[in-house]
Image (cartoon, grey):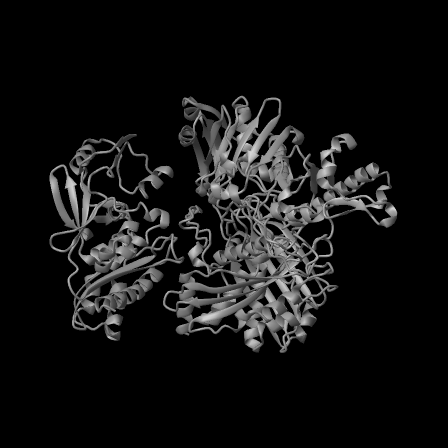
Amino acid sequence: MNYHTPSTFEDAARLAGAAGGVTRFLAGGTDVLVQMRAGMVLPDDLIDLKKIPGVHDIARTADGGWRIGIAVPGAALGANAALVADWPGVVEGMELVGSTQVQGRATLAGNLCNGSPAADSVPGLIAAGATAEITGPGGTRSAPVEEIPAGPGKTTLAPGELISAILLPPRGKAGGDAYLRFIPRTEMDIAVAGCAVNLRLEGDTIAEARVALGAVAPRIALAPGCAAAIIGTTLDEAALAALDAAAQAACSPIDDKRGTVAFRTEVAGVLARRAAAIAYSRAKGE
Amino acid sequence: MAKDELSEFHLVGTRPLRPDGLDKVTGRARYGADVSMPGMLWGAVVRSPHAHARIVRIDASKAEALPGVKAVVTRADFPEGLTGENWNLQENTMAGERALYDGHAVAAVAATSALRAQEAARLIEVEYEVLPHVIDVDDAIRPDAPVIREGAADATVPEGSPPNVARYIEFGHGDTEAGFAKADLVRARSYKTEATHQGYIEPHACLGQLGADGKGEMWVCTQGQWFIRQMCSSVLGLEAAQLRVTPSEIGGGFGGKTTIFMEPLSLALSRKAGGRPVKIVMTRSEVLRATGPTASASMDVKIGMTKDGMITAADAEFRMQGGAFPGAPVDMALYCAFAPYKLPASRHVGYDVLANRPKCAAYRAPGSPMGAFAVESLIDEMCRELGLDPLDVRLKNAVKEGDRASYGPTFGSIGLVETLEAVKSHPNLELPLGPNQGRGIASGYWFNHSGETSVSLAISEDGTVQVSVGTPDIGGSRASIALMTAETLGIAYEDVRVNVVETGALGVNEPTHGSRATFASGKAAVIAARRAIAEMCRRAAAEWGIDAEAVEWANGAAQPAGPNAGKFPPMGIEEIAAKMGSTGGPISGHHESVPEGVGASFGCHVVDVEVDPETGRTTILRYLVVQDAGRAIHPSYVEGQFQGGAAQGIGWALNEAYVYGQDGRLQNAVFLDYRVPVASDLPMIDTQIVEVPNPGHPFGVRGVGETGITPPLPAIANAIEAAAGVRMRSLPMSPPKVLAAIKAAREG
């Protein structure tokens, strides 16, 4: 196994592009190292990105959004009061990953690239309208986060491509987001279903909304029907019922050791209602 | 360390620092995997990926050709002709003709590094012929089920029984039909519990060394070094005294480390590798696939009750599978199921059934939690139907000293009534409950156990005292034995060090199981201390020139028994110790026996839950454990045992289960998906220690480790019905099952 510590993303992309065998990028390492230890993957080339300048930084962008380095751990997101004030749903999703120890290492970019349909930080990013900055052999491009997952364990990134930053848009006024997941325990578990809601109010009425569902389909994805169910409403009982139904309709889960199709579908509707209520309340500044 | 002034004891009942605390919090404690030796090899085990398969061929040539590989063993390297449980142990250590469960060992390899050993294990080619398998106990007992082993039935099994029934048990008393006829309400219900793992944090680990001369040593994480010695010797055809076994510090056992799994493999590999020591450390996945959980159970219970709550008769038929070998604790389950109740008539029937799952091991009160789930649930259901208070009904039918137990013997001094009355007056019972919240109660029982015990105590030159015990400390026994020894000798707790010693140092000791360490090793240590006291009195008498009978021991010193004995200043233990070399030599005390006078322990738990009606998720709001300890030697450890039993029971009740695919493979062999409770799942568990001293122990100890896991399963089921209006009769009471029950009830 070759262990690399490139000092730029361009070098990292070059190394990955030239590598012939199994390649893994190392940010927090909370997935890759565990998989290596379990014998699930034995990389020929392990490219550690933590030495690249800027990867540990959380920065305001010129437009009032946020640029989050790919090695920023969940604990650092939670400690950034301004970021938490803007995007509490994004941060609470990331903070649900693993344990206190894992929070010291695990990253948004890593959670996204691991490709799990149950990744807790991804629905919040998608609902927020986050984009991924991608560096590859051909240069740098960006893509909405919802375009990255490609199915369990897979991403749409081309060989040699890697995420070099996560970008969050400006929060703006009267907005709120929230993420809820269902697990049988209180922590240290994988989502059986998850839902993130991001919305913006004009008065008491929802003017814009984005809803993303996790763990109920092969990919974490936007649920436009859910957004449509609550836009133009004050999130009254009828809107919540419509949201519940739309969330259930958007599910295409599997039966497995973590949950059944029926349970996942029903709980996705419950979580959508509850997350929307929290986002709405946050948007009102309550 | 504050002590009730009125107490008759100076130390017993206090809460000094635990002797293993500093080692454990600083990382200095040496666990099973922490021992290494020069020239050591690493072992890795090849395991069957099939639930049931004939082993057609094993080809290790590629592995053997790998540099650094020093030995490969298969069943062919083990002696033949074993019978009974020794054969079972050998077959479970290494599969013979057939792999009997997913994870069953089929070969093992030793190499110069752990990675090389794992690589070699992957290169060992095993050809299997997959056979039909059976997982669920009710499927396994069908007449047409795949046969796990021809001729497995022992003499107890009636002619014509289904092929996987290995043992049958039946007992009872009185006329049950007449009893049911006297009842105002008779109800019969069926209940199921899943197999659960003990979930100890430390995986099995050992370092074994065995020469061609048959002399060997082993360092191992175990609850019983003599059991390891006996079982390894039997499986490998060694002489027991030639194998010396040293137990490590232990990171949890709960019964699961009272037997062998991969330990003989390290010895077999070592012998084949020219006597180089071989270390084997299991992964968590190996622990879950291939070590012993408890059994799963399917149970039918029938109870008759009068409208004022008197039980008139009871009938129980339990079917339990404990894997591909006999040994499911169906007998224990039946003995304990009705133990808290005085029954006019009873009938108990049990089947021990084989299935393609790992060989079960002991798990904290083996069998008792399953029986309690069935019986304590049904009693709660009947109390609801009759509008009776479940605590009053338990008090009304409670067994007392002199009553005949449901399983035969007559109870001596027991504390069930005192326990139930303590529950009744506990403030938790008065706390208000909100919407979707409910309260459940249930009782539980464990016999407790004594067993072969050998303890030596020696006075050091400075008057401090070492105690050598053979029972590994899994729950505070070093602290409790030090307290009892110091109390007996009249010296400071800090002046006693209790060591858990290797097999070469004492006579045979049973493992720390059956909640016996503080009872049995503690009782033996007290007797050993008394013998040392007698000797110290003799030394003082000789110096004073008076009769030994005229000397008594008090406050850590020999002194004349009265004014007639003569006038001498007390001679302290330090003084006697300092000159023992010139007064007759070393002073020690020893005791070995199977101590008599075991005291049984009853408990009663009260749990408050909230059930989310939209997700079926149960939150434990509040939990109370009340249990008779006899006497709490170190109350913090006793409370810890109560809390630990409740925590494991909560996991068993709510989320823990072995999830098998259609192919018979275990799907959740990691802690991520084998869901033991995490700290944030549990409230601080309230405890109340009841003390009805056991007359069979010098300080009244009963043993407290196991009863605490018995009531949680039914207590939580009873609370869920109170909260959500649904009766869960199968475990785990996981959110999908509870939600489905809520929806079914809503849809009527």
Residue at (69% x, 40% y) in the render: B455
B183 lies left or right of A18:
right
The image shows residue B721 at horizontal and vertical percentages of: 48, 70
Position of residue A159 relative to residue B319, above or below, is above
The image shows residue B456 at horizontal and vertical percentages of: 70, 39
A237 lies left or right of B166:
left
A57 lies left or right of B226:
left
Q: Quadrant of the N terminus of chain B?
A: bottom right
Q: Quadrant of the C terminus of chain B?
A: bottom left
Between B230 and B500, which is closer to the camera in this rendering? B500
Give residue A206's quadrant in the image: bottom left
Between B257 and A59, which is closer to the camera in this rendering? A59
Residue at (40% x, 32% y) in the render: B122
Query: Residue placed farthest to the right in the image?
Result: B564
Position of residue B281 relative to residue B673, above or below, is above
The image shows residue B360 at horizontal and vertical percentages of: 55, 47
The image shows residue B499 at horizontal and vertical percentages of: 62, 39
Between B604 and B348, which is closer to the camera in this rendering? B604
Residue at (43% x, 23% y) in the render: B68
B696 lies left or right of A106:
right
The answer, for residue B731, to whether it is visible in the render is: yes
Position of residue B179 relative to residue B20, above or below, is below
The answer, for residue B52, to whether it is visible in the render is: no
Q: How many marks?
A: 0
